[in-house]
Amino acid sequence: MKRVNYNGMQMNPSATIVDEAAAEIKDARCKIFAYNSNGKLALATDGSKPLVGIATIEVGVNDITGAESGKINAGDDIDIQIKDIGFVIAGATIAKGDEITSDENGEAKKAAAGDYVIGFALNAVEKGGFVKIQISKYQKAKA
């Protein structure tokens, strides 16, 4: 057997990736994203397909007035957290330990049977709050 020498890093240790936005998004911060059919990042609209990750809090326009903070234009780069612990805006009441997927607005909701899961909640939160998620992607078993 021939000996092979592998030099350098074999995996990317970064918790984030950067990829292209499929469309304009009014405020992408702390929302859940998936790839569309063209391989571009789109706001996730449910848990029916694999979820890529969570947009970081600093993503998009940094507008001191707040009028356009977090805005993304089609073709812009988006910073997406794909592992470790991150924050997502809750689209519903979330209990600590709930498996989390995306609602129609890219916000967190409790996953149902068959949904793709982005991770599980590390805190309880009401709708509109920030849920801390341990990112762990998989598809929940169907009923």
Image (spheres, helix red, strand yellow):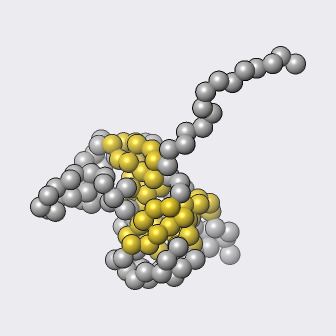
Seen at 16% across and 62% down, the residue is: 66
Q: Which residue in the rendered view is the most extreme toward the left?
A: 65
Which residue of the protein is positioned furthest toward the front in this rendering? 8
Q: Is residue 24 visible?
A: no
Residue under the point 72% across and 21% down = 5
Picture coordinates of residue 35, whole percent (x, y): 46, 49
Quadrant location of the C terminus? bottom right
Q: Is residue 94 above or below residue 18?
A: below
Q: Nearer the viewer, residue 83 or 139?
A: 83
Estimate the x, y position of residue 104 in percent, counting from the top left: 39, 68
Q: Residue furthest top?
A: 2
- Residue 133 vs 5, above or below: the answer is below
The residue at the point 48 percent across, 81 percent down is 124
Quarter holding residue 91: bottom left
Q: Is residue 52 left or right of residue 24?
A: right
Residue 74 percent across, percent down from the top left: 28, 45
Q: Is residue 100 left or right of residue 44?
A: right
Residue 9 figure quarter:
top right
Percent position (x, y) of residue 7?
65, 24
Which residue is located at x 43 percent, y 80 percent?
125
91 relative to 97 in the view: left or right: left
Quadrant position of the N terminus in the picture: top right
Whether residue 10 can be seen here:
yes
* In the rendered image, the vertical position of residue 19 relative to residue 33, given as above or below: above
Quarter occupied by residue 38: top left
Considering only vertical position in the picture, is 94 above or below 80?
A: below
Nearer to us in this view, 128 or 74: 128
Q: How many marks?
A: 0
